[in-house]
Image (cartoon, rainbow, N blue to C red):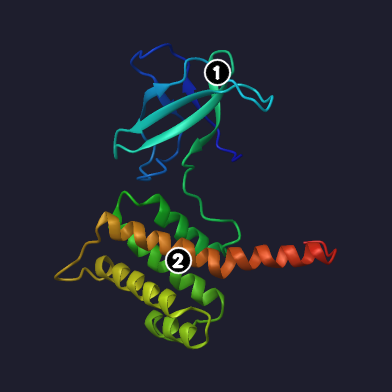
């Protein structure tokens, strides 16, 4: 379970004002302080066969993007306390280096502003390559050098160049195509996250596993 701490008003039926409250960003469009309106709720707590506590479930719609999330909670008297929602809010992994992680989190948080998200995704890729030693030359040159060194596969390098070009368009106010579409921004952020998982998260997980297997404290 994640440590999301949000709450929903305890209301009955379809009473107006029944919303998911306390959510920092919509997990779909990343807009801040989203208005999440309930469109469905379970009729009381849902029984479980594993002996666990029955939980109340609800489905909510973001009024900004129209996407749905599911939430469950336990009865806390005047409120239902919601420990987790699905899908969860986007969060850059803690194993990603600090500078790259901040860029990546900003990219995730600005998906509702595609140009900003694309620029931050490009900066995240740039920072990740610098962290592993590719500091000299342009980003174009460093991506090709990482490919030549077999740090990146051909497909990953091609995608990194695509993210680089996408981030350059709004950054340099390209005359013909200055703006990035929401779909392209989403793909840029997804690649930046995938690259972070490949270069940093997976590596850190493997290192911890090896140390644990050999009895070495992490």
Residue placed furthest toward the front: 49
Apparent side of residue 1 relative to residue 7 in the rendered image (left or right):
right
Element type where label 1 sits in the image: loop
Which tag, 2 or 1, sits closer to the chain's start? 1
Q: Residue at x 27, y 54 (%)?
A: 182
Question: Which residue is at the front of the view, 38 or 119?
Answer: 38
**Does 140 appear above or below 2?**
below
Apparent side of residue 185 relative to residue 25 in the rendered image (left or right):
left
Q: Residue at x 22, y 62 (%)?
A: 179
Image location of residue 217, percent across then percent down: 82, 61
| Image quadrant where one finds the N terminus | top right
Q: Residue at x 25, y 61 (%)?
A: 180
- Location of residue 82 (image quadrant): top right
Q: Residue at x 42, y 86 (%)?
A: 137
Question: Which numbered marker is on residue 96?
Answer: none
Question: Which residue is labeled 1 in the image?
Answer: 45
Image location of residue 199, percent across then percent down: 55, 70
Task: Give how far apart the Cα atoms at labels 2 and 1 are.
Answer: 43 Å
Question: Which residue is at the front of the view, 53 or 106?
Answer: 53
Q: Are marks 2 and 1 in contact (CB under 8 Å)?
A: no
Question: Which residue is labeled 2 in the image?
Answer: 124
Which tag is nearer the camera, tag 2 or tag 1? 1
- Location of residue 37 (image quadrant): top left
Element type where label 2 sits in the image: helix
Q: Residues within 10 Å of mark 2 (few under 14, many from 20)?
A: many
**Does 4 appear above or below 131?**
above
Image location of residue 29, percent across then percent down: 35, 45
Image location of residue 68, percent across then percent down: 37, 35
């Amino acid at each position: 379970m994640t440590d999301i701490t949000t709450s929903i008003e305890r209301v009955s039926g379809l009473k107006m004002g029944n919303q998911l409250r306390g959510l920092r960003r919509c997990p779909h469009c990343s807009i801040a302080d989203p208005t999440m309106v309930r469109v469905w709720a379970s009729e009381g707590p849902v029984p479980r066969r594993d002996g666990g506590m029955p939980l109340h479930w609800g489905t909510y719609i973001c009024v900004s993007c129209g996407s749905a999330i599911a939430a469950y909670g336990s009865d806390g008297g005047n409120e239902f306390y919601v420990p987790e929602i699905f899908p969860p809010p986007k969060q850059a992994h803690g194993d990603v280096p600090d500078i790259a992680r901040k860029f990546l989190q900003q990219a995730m948080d600005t998906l509702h502003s595609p140009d900003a998200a694309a620029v931050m995704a490009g900066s995240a890729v740039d920072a990740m390559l610098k962290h592993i030693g590719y500091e000299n030359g342009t980003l174009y040159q460093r991506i090709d050098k990482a490919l030549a060194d077999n740090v990146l596969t051909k497909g990953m390098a091609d995608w990194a160049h695509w993210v680089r070009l996408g981030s350059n368009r709004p950054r340099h106010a390209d005359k013909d195509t200055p703006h990035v579409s929401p779909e392209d921004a989403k793909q840029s952020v997804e690649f930046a996250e995938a690259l972070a998982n490949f270069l940093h998260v997976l590596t850190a997980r493997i290192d911890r596993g090896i140390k644990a297997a050999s009895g070495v404290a992490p």
